[in-house]
Image: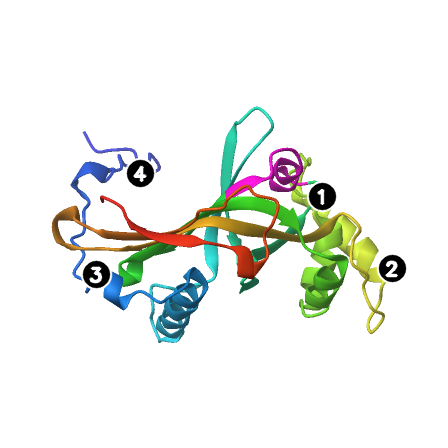
Amino acid sequence: MSQHPNRAQPQTVPDPATQRRDYATGGLSESDLAPTWLSQFARWFTEASAAGAAPGSALAEPNAMVFATADARGRPSARIVLLKAFDERGFTLFTNYTSRKGRDAATNPYGSLVFPWHALGRQIVVAGTLERVSTEETAAYFRTRPRGSRLAAWVSHQSETINSRDVLERRRAELAARWPEPEPIPVPPFWGGLRLVPDSVEFWAGRHDRLHDRLRFRRTDAGEACRSARDEHWVIERLAP
């Protein structure tokens, strides 16, 4: 008997247990490590950005990172966001403060970042405290965003349940009429930057047979009130893979 032509054919689902990759990178030794987490991150981020710019690269957005938070009861959530700045103070992203991650940061100001640069056989894992950036920093970044992205910051009440996409399209049309070009679009009062101030920054490099290299910069004065750069003390530790 022939099958009905409109009936969906059974799909063969790949078995994730059979999917594995053996990393053949040069690894990471203590002698190759930069003296500070910031200089090491800058080195790897520069290399990831160069690799991402190559035609056909599998590393399309090297500034994409997994950002994990937890609410007041410790229930975690994670999402992919974009890194927008980094310096000796930490790693900065921008978001709606009323979103889930924004609410988490306000009630439980701890978070983690993962940069999954598996195309290079590398990843970076960061953990630390969360703080809001200044309104001046937020305004300076907001002015660099494309006009459509500035409107979108007003349009989307992030993490809010909506009935349909039409809600977003109507809001965008209303706000585009409210601020026609070339009129500037102000920064929403509920939108701004979050900075993750690191207590640890781990650099992971893939090796054969899952014997990867993991080198971690860990702040030894984590949790103390004084956070100025000259008073920070870091140790470098090798972790078992």
10 Å crowding of disc 4: few (<14), some (14-19), many (20+): few
Instruction: Return the residue nearer the eye: 148 or 184.
Output: 184
* Residue 188: x %, y % from top left: 78, 53
Give the structural element (helix, strand or loop) at label 4.
loop
* Sequence-wise first label, 3 or 2: 3
Q: Which residue occupies 49% across, 46% down?
A: 221
User: Which residue has dot 4 on it?
Assistant: 5
Instruction: Return the residue nearer the eye: 2 or 51.
Output: 51
User: Which residue has dot 1 on it?
Assistant: 157
User: Which residue has dot 3 on it?
Assistant: 27
**Can residue 93 be seen?**
yes
Residue type at tag 1: His
Give the structural element (helix, strand or loop) at label 3.
loop
Residue depth check, mark 1 versus mark 4: number of the one nearer the observer: 1
**The quarter of the displayed image where residue 94 is located:** bottom right
Magenta part of the protein: which range? 99-111
**The quarter of the displayed image where residue 25 is located:** bottom left
Residue type at tag 2: Arg
User: Which residue has dot 2 on it?
Assistant: 178
In the picture shown, does residue 43 fall above or below 211? below
* Residue 189: x %, y % from top left: 80, 50
In contact (CB < 8 Å): disc 3 and disc 2: no
* Residue 192: x %, y % from top left: 70, 53
Give the structural element (helix, strand or loop) at label 2.
helix
Marks 2 and 4, how far apart at CA: 52 Å
Main structural element of the magenta stretch: helix, strand or loop?
helix
Q: Which residue occupies 29% across, 63% down?
A: 120
